[in-house]
Image (spheres, rainbow, N blue to C red):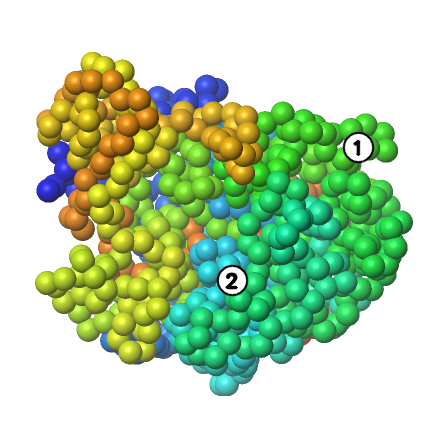
């Protein structure tokens, strides 16, 4: 039945929103509004200088540019029914306007070569709202750091789920289903770089094309790119510029009887010494013989799929990772520091040592925290740095933790230690750049293991399509909700308009038709093995409309407040049955109260980062009381239908990795800068290529030093809206 709140349309606007209960910053000051078919959004007053009003309407721009850049709403490129297509429509933003003139220095806001040192810090799975509007316990990240540099309010991941974003950042390669699925196996890809036609005529020029074909199910493509696919690291090698990746927990011990998370620095931190063979189409990959251990443990929270260098044969075959191996005192075989790979924090830390002298500080430092410090885990399995650090010679060795809370809290602790060390280094003072980014955006409501946050917005399909699964970049001076899909994850529709492919956004926060909801309609059920080229629907990372679910709850007799740590914001309006529950009862307002995790995620019982509860209401939305006490009793939430499911959408594509925001700090940036222009991972790669002037020795696929989709004609790198310190910029413009 339809819920009493009409969760598909405007009646939803009358339901109370969750309150942020961190204490410092309250949601009560936000003004709720209903836009675009009842999608709720709010304007936060938590940090006045960085407030952002997000209009949650699919395909609509969320802000107006602060410079001359025009924000344009762009529909997804049309597709031929059931046949993958890479055809560029006439109205595509990738076509240059007739009056467009290419800017000097590629539009970069500082002359190439002036910034000599870049630190790229990659965090995990947070939406702009989750990080920067006061929902989390992260005042250093959300307030202090923006006050020191530039806050980019519209910065987008290029896909879901995770690993495809790391690949894009360093190579410009578009999502492919195996990397979207975080590479369950360490096996080789087979295919080639598409260099047919020209950059202007071929939208996939410079992209790797998998031999498995477009939208091949995960496991059919392989995961390690062949040596023909270049990276920024190869470009820097050619340009005789230094680079190094620093990974937290690199070399940490793994529990007895478990697979090692990585096999050593000389193998680039990869999960195996050997790359497995290319999978045979349809066999699901080589996960049995060459598995990729993708989860943290209490002693080792490093995960190899967040370290991109071990997934490119062009880096593996170069021998870079073994160059200089043996800097550490424990000998060559166990060393965790080389010229290009080093440990971050802990007894073998190389990062702080390298920072002490300019000559030892790489031109590009890629910083990869482990799965706690990067915010991935809501409850950490190991140390979250909450106990601080030792002193003197032990200043890089974490003390024992005092709690295990993850998410933005753990990100905040990590950055509070790392960023000041960079800022105090002689290399940064010369005019360096710190870029703090996130791989992808996830909703700011309690929805998955990475997000223990209260919410300002309802989780809806439209909200996902316009925010957490959306795309954005600036092309030819226009900020657009668009990115090229690439040849391996194109947007494909059926003859009835149904979305058959997962697209770059992998359907991550969308419910698609399954066998049950498609019955009696002209829709095709979406599955994890659907072959799009045969007219089937590939589900990707999406879900289906929830059926009845059983959860454990507690409540006093005669109370309308039900404690339930499994309850989520998108359960509001579902029917509730069980002992002590009156008939005709529903889930009313959901409240998630952040909690300090006093035990790790692997403890018995495991720690929790929030406590959940909901108000029990009748069909009219009036609170009703339990008829008996519930003491860890089972309750059942009723099944939903597509009409009741706010995340259900059968027809619209998911185009990207969503808006996560981005932070940049540099002497070339005026403190407190806010840019509303659209950027993404391809723009970051293009900016690094321009900043470090790699075109001198590595012309790329466009002849200007850009590779992958960093080579898009008209793609804007970080411009004068970011590099706003005109005095420093002009002072250093003519000298290197």
Q: Observer-nearest residue: 250 or 340? A: 250
- Determine which quarter of the picture holds residue 568: top left
Secondary structure at numbered mark 2 = loop
The residue shown at (49%, 31%) is 605
Q: Position of residue 224 (x, y in %)?
A: 59, 70
- Residue extending farthest to the front is 257
Whether residue 31 can be seen here: no
- The quarter of the image holding the N terminus is top left
Q: Which residue does the image show at 24% across and 50% down from the upper left?
A: 545
- The residue shown at (77%, 66%) is 320
- Cα separation, mark 2 vs mark 1, equals 36 Å
Q: Is 698 situated left or right of 64 in this image?
A: right
On residue 395, which mark appears?
Answer: 1
| Disc 1 element | loop
Give x and y (percent) for residue 608. 47, 30
Q: Disc 2 or 1, which lies upstream in sequence?
A: 2
Q: Residue at x 64, y 35 (%)?
A: 383
Q: Residues within 10 Å of mark 1 (few under 14, many from 20)?
A: some
Q: Nearer the viewer, mark 2 or mark 1?
A: 2
In the image shown, does 352 or 75 lie closer to the viewer?
A: 352
Q: Residues within 10 Å of mark 2 (few under 14, many from 20)?
A: many
Residue located farthest toward the bottom when viewing the structure as drawn: 196
Depth order, front residue of 10/553: 553
Check contact, mark 2 vs mark 1: CB within 8 A.
no
x then y, percent, for residue 263: 70, 59
Reading the image, the residue beneath label 2 is 184
On screen, residue 186 above or below 403: below
Is any atom of residue 277 visible in this view? yes
């Amino acid at each position: 039945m339809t819920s009493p709140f009409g969760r598909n349309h405007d009646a939803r606007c009358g339901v109370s929103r969750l309150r942020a209960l961190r204490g410092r910053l309250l949601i009560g000051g936000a003004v709720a509004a209903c836009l675009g078919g009842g999608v709720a959004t709010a304007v936060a007053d938590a940090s006045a200088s960085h407030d952002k009003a997000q209009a949650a309407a699919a395909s609509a721009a969320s802000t107006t540019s602060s410079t001359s850049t025009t924000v344009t709403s762009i529909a997804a490129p049309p597709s031929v029914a059931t046949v993958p297509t890479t055809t560029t429509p006439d109205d595509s933003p990738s076509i240059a306007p007739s009056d467009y003139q290419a800017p000097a220095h590629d539009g970069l806001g500082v002359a190439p070569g002036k910034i000599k040192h870049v630190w790229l810090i990659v965090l995990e799975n947070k939406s702009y709202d989750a990080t920067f509007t006061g929902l989390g316990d992260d005042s250093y990240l959300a307030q202090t750091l923006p006050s020191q540099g530039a806050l980019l309010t519209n910065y987008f991941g290029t896909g879901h789920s995770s690993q495809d974003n790391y690949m894009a950042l360093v190579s410009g390669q578009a999502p492919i289903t195996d990397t979207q699925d975080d590479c369950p196996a360490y096996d080789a890809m087979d295919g080639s770089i598409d260099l047919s036609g020209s950059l202007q005529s071929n939208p996939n020029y410079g992209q790797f094309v998998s031999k498995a074909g477009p939208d091949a199910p995960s496991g059919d493509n392989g995961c390690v790119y062949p040596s023909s696919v270049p990276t920024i690291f190869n470009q820097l090698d050619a340009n005789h510029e230094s680079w190094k990746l620093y990974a937290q927990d690199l070399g940490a011990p793994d529990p007895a009887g478990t697979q090692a998370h990585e096999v050593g620095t000389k193998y680039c931190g990869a999960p195996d010494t050997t790359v497995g063979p290319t999978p045979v189409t349809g066999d699901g990959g080589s996960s049995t013989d060459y598995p990729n251990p993708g989860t943290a443990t209490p002693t080792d929270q490093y995960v190899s799929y967040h370290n991109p260098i071990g997934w490119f044969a062009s880096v593996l075959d170069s021998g870079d990772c073994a160059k200089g191996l043996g800097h550490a005192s424990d000998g060559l075989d166990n060393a965790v520091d080389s010229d290009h790979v080093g440990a971050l924090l802990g007894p073998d830390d190389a990062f702080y040592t390298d920072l002490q002298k300019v000559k030892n500080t790489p031109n590009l430092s890629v910083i990869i925290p482990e799965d706690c410090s990067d915010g991935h885990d809501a409850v950490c399995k190991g140390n979250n740095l909450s106990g601080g650090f030792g002193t003197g010679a032990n200043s890089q060795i974490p003390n024992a933790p005092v709690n295990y809370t993850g998410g933005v809290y753990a990100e905040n602790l990590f950055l509070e230690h790392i960023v000041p060390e960079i800022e105090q280094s002689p290399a940064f003072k010369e005019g360096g750049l710190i870029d703090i980014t996130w791989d992808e955006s996830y909703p700011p409501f309690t929805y998955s293991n990475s997000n223990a946050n209260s919410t300002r917005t309802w989780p809806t399909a439209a909200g996902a399509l316009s925010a957490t699964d959306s795309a954005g970049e600036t092309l030819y001076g226009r900020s657009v909700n668009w990115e090229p899909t690439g040849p391996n994850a194109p947007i494909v529709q059926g003859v009835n308009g149904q979305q058959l492919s997962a697209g770059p956004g992998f359907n991550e926060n969308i419910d698609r038709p399954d066998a049950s909801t498609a019955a009696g309609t002209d829709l095709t059920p979406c599955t994890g093995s659907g072959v799009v080229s045969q007219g089937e629907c590939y589900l990707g990372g999406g879900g289906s409309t929830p059926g009845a679910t059983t959860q454990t709850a507690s409540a006093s007799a005669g109370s309308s407040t039900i404690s339930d740590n499994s309850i989520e914001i998108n359960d509001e309006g579902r029917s509730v049955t069980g002992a002590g529950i009156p008939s005709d009862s529903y889930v009313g307002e959901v409240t998630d109260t952040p909690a300090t995790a006093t035990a790790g995620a692997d403890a018995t019982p495991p720690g929790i980062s929030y406590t959940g509860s909901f108000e029990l209401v009748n069909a009219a939305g009036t609170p009703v009381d339990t008829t008996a006490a519930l003491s860890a009793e089972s309750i059942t939430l009723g099944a939903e239908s597509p009409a009741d499911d706010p995340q259900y959408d059968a027809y619209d594509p998911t185009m990207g990795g969503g808006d996560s925001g981005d932070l940049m700090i540099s002497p070339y940036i005026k403190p407190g800068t806010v840019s509303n222009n659209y950027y993404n991972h391809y723009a970051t790669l293009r900016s690094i290529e321009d900043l470090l002037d790699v075109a001198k020795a590595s012309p790329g696929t466009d002849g200007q030093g850009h590779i992958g989709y960093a080579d898009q004609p008209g793609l804007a790198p970080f411009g004068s809206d970011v590099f706003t310190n005109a005095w420093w910029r002009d002072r250093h413009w003519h000298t290197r």
